[in-house]
Image: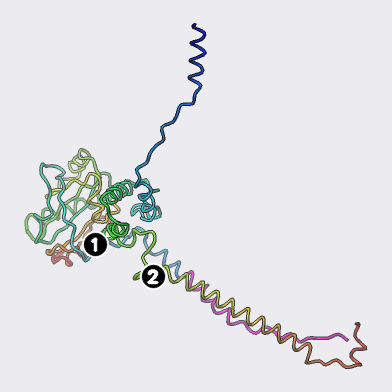
Amino acid sequence: MKRLMLILALIVMSFPAGAASVSEDPTEPRVRDLAVLLRCPVCQSENILDSHSSTAREMLVILRERIAEGMSDAEIFEFFRTRYGDYVLLSPPMTGPGRIVWLVPAGLVLLGLGVFMLILARHKRRAARELKDSVLMSPLDASGLKGMEL
Amino acid sequence: MTIEVDMPRKKGGLEWKLPLLAALVGLPLLLGIGLTRDPNRIPSALVGKSMPAFEIPYLQRAGMLNSAEHAGKPMLLNFWASWCTTCRVEHPKLVELGVRSQLSDEFSILGINYRDDPARAAGFLNREGHFGYPSGYDERGRLGIDFGVYGMPETFFIDADGVVQARHAGPVTDKVLAKYLPLIGVDP
């Protein structure tokens, strides 16, 4: 009997314990999405999700509260922007001086593309001219042909 | 005989030398300007706007510190903490300003004790000297976030209409006061 109980106990204990799945608040993904776009004012090159500074922690708490209140993304960004300015947005707005950050790289890419096309066109033209020159400028006569190793 | 093709010689190539020169001069220039800028100086979004109204508990007495009770006069709002070493530098100046505001009634001055432990804050005041004005207690730094505070100490200069005219990050000195007090209608 004792042996049977032992065997039974061993069998029961060998079943994997089912881990209770951790259920996360359904708003948490949105909290993370927004938090990575907000700059920590203290550490400056980190977003408030990654930062361990107490200010960033508190901003994260405020962010959760605002989401719970039903604020839209734009309203939440505006909330932090009125306090810390455009600086707090890791993705600067396309207005005012923020436009420079967006337009300059795009302009440089266009400029580079233009220069590249220009160089390409010049090369093509030169190649065509050289071909023409080599064929037309020195007509080969019979005497010339004789000297050539054909 | 061999066919000789006269290759057109490359021109001076000024077209690409010029942009290269511009880049070689321009880039270090931009980077140089970047070096002179202090990344810790964040412009305040509050300047030119109304000061956020607040009501927070006092640090060292019962009751609430209400910003509305101090409206109608130019105001200095100083964020400080016992853990902030720079706060020790500006402390005598603040005590002096507190005395002046009590005597003259030209302006009011308030402190906000930011993310501190009340016991430590009391120790700090006992050691460095008490302000002649009350401080509110911003336990979790919420009011600091409302003011866009990012470091200690910070001082806001608010005019009689309640509009923030300036924000100074760093210790308050005579030079700072000479610069900002006239903005809120107070002689430095």
Q: Count up the numbered dots.
A: 2
Q: Are marks 2 and 1 in contact (CB under 8 Å)?
A: no
Residue A8 at x, y = what percent? 50, 14
Q: Is A114 rendered above or below residue A6?
A: below
Instruction: Name the subunit of mark 2.
Output: A
Between the C-alphas of marks 2 and 1, the distance is: 22 Å
| Discs 2 and 1 carry the same chain letter | no
Q: Residue at x 78, y 91 (%)?
A: A136
Circle 1 residue:
B46
Question: Is B70 in front, or is B133?
Answer: B70
Q: Which residues are magenta?
A: B1-28
Q: Amino acid at mark 1?
A: Leu
Residue that appears at 18% across and 67% down: B183
Tell me which amino acid carries mark 2: Arg
Q: Quadrant of the C terminus of chain A?
A: bottom right
Which mark, residue A99? Answer: 2
Residue at the location (20% across, 40% down)?
B118
Q: Inspect the magenta stretch and tell me whether residue B23 lies in it.
A: yes
The image quarter containing residue A121 is bottom right
Q: Residues within 10 Å of mark 2 (few under 14, many from 20)?
A: few
Tell me where residue B2 appears, x and y as whole percent: 86, 85
Q: Can you tell which quarter of the image residue B40 is in?
A: bottom left
Horizontal placement of B43 versus B5: left or right?
Answer: left
Q: Position of residue B146 (x, y in %)?
A: 23, 54
Is A41 included in the stretch rendered in magenta? no
Q: Residues within 10 Å of mark 1 (few under 14, many from 20)?
A: many
Q: Give the vertical position of B140 relative to A97 (above or below).
A: above
Front residue (pair B57, A8): A8
Q: Position of residue B29 (x, y in %)?
A: 46, 71
Q: Which mark is residue B113?
A: none
